[in-house]
């Protein structure tokens, strides 16, 4: 083969080799570039994922911190509310205790004042009652003395007949009034009935009977009170009074002090009552 052709063939081969080498270099360069780019992309994706995870972790941490802060704030608020409630309840309990103590103190003071007032009133009433009894005893004694003086100095009047004699029966028992009225009516006495001491006192103010027969225990005004009242007035001081009671021995002294002329114990013989009426009307002394 001629030299020129050999050189030309070599140049072509070398060119092909150079081209092939260039293509290889380019391929390797392209593959290296792609590899680097893939690595870069992977690194970027990894970095993005890491950043996303970091952001998620940051947000989670922030959310956890916020939740924890809210929980602590809620606990603190609840504790503060409990403390305020406890303080309010303690203050209310103290106020209630003080109110109860004040009310108890006022009640004790009021009770003491009432007790003192009752004691003063009781003492006043006792003093007035003692004074009244003393005045009644004095009036009764004066009346007896006056009646005795009149009896001694004045000639006795002519005794009335039973038909002219008015006998008052004062008793809160209707049975006793009816029974005694029948007994006296059978003896032709004029009988006037009184349901109790007050009724007898009112009737005697209007018309004075000749003899009064009275029970001891009666509502409104007892027989002893009626007797004291009658003996305290000059117009009725000399009225003969027969008192009937179931405990004559116990009341004898009090009846005598009040001015009762005759004290009969229950039960009594009817003849005894009639005899006492006759004795009183004739001016004879009776016991």
Image: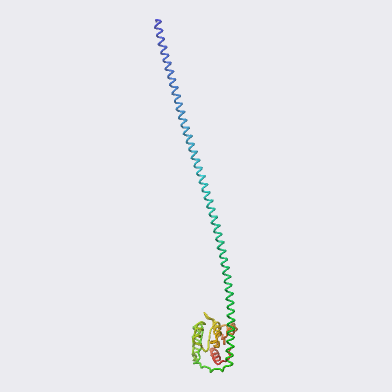
Viewer-proximal residue, 112 or 19? 112
Viewer-proximal residue, 37 or 259? 259
Left or right for 224, reference 30: right
Q: Is residue 279 depicted above or below 91 in this figure?
A: below
Viewer-proximal residue, 53 or 5? 53
Q: Is residue 282 depicted above or below 229 in this figure?
A: below
Q: Is residue 93 depicted above or below 152 in this figure?
A: above
Q: Position of residue 17 (x, y in %)?
A: 42, 13
Q: Quadrant of residue 147?
A: bottom right
Q: Position of residue 136 (x, y in %)?
A: 58, 82
Of all residues, the one furthest to the top in this rendering is 2
Q: Position of residue 70 (x, y in %)?
A: 50, 44
Q: Quadrant of residue 250?
A: bottom right
Q: Quadrant of residue 119?
A: bottom right
Count all numbered tags in the image, as a single digit. Answer: 0
Quadrant of the image for the N terminus? top left
Left or right for 118, reference 13: right
Query: By what rule are the colours in the image chosen?
Result: rainbow
Q: Position of residue 6 (x, y in %)?
A: 40, 7
Viewer-proximal residue, 36 or 17? 36
Quadrant of the image for the C terminus? bottom right
């Amino acid at each position: 083969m001629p030299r020129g052709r050999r050189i030309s063939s070599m140049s072509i081969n070398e060119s092909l080799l150079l081209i092939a080498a260039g293509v290889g270099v380019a391929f390797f360069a392209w593959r290296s570039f792609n590899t680097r780019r893939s690595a870069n992309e992977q690194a970027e994706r990894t970095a993005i994922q890491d950043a996303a995870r970091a952001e998620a972790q940051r947000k989670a941490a922030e959310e956890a911190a916020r939740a924890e802060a809210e929980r602590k704030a809620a606990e603190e608020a609840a504790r503060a509310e409990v403390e305020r409630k406890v303080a309010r309840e303690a203050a209310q309990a103290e106020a209630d205790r003080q109110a109860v103590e004040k009310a108890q103190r006022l009640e004790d003071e009021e009770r003491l004042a009432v007790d003192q007032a009752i004691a003063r009133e009781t003492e006043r009433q006792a003093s007035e009652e003692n004074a009244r009894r003393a005045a009644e005893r004095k009036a009764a004694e004066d009346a007896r003395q006056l009646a005795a003086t009149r009896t001694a100095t004045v000639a006795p009047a002519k005794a009335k007949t039973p038909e002219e004699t008015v006998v008052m029966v004062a008793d809160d028992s209707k049975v006793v009034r009816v029974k005694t009225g029948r007994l006296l009516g059978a003896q032709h006495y004029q009988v006037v009935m009184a349901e109790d001491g007050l009724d007898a006192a009112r009737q005697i103010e209007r018309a004075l009977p000749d003899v009064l027969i009275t029970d001891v225990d009666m509502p409104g005004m007892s027989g002893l009170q009626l007797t004291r009242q009658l003996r305290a007035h000059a117009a009725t001081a000399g009225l003969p009074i027969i008192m009937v009671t179931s405990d004559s021995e116990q009341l004898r002294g009090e009846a005598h002090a009040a001015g009762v002329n005759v004290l009969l114990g229950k039960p009594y013989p009817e003849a005894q009552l009639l005899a006492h009426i006759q004795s009183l009307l004739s001016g004879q002394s009776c016991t």
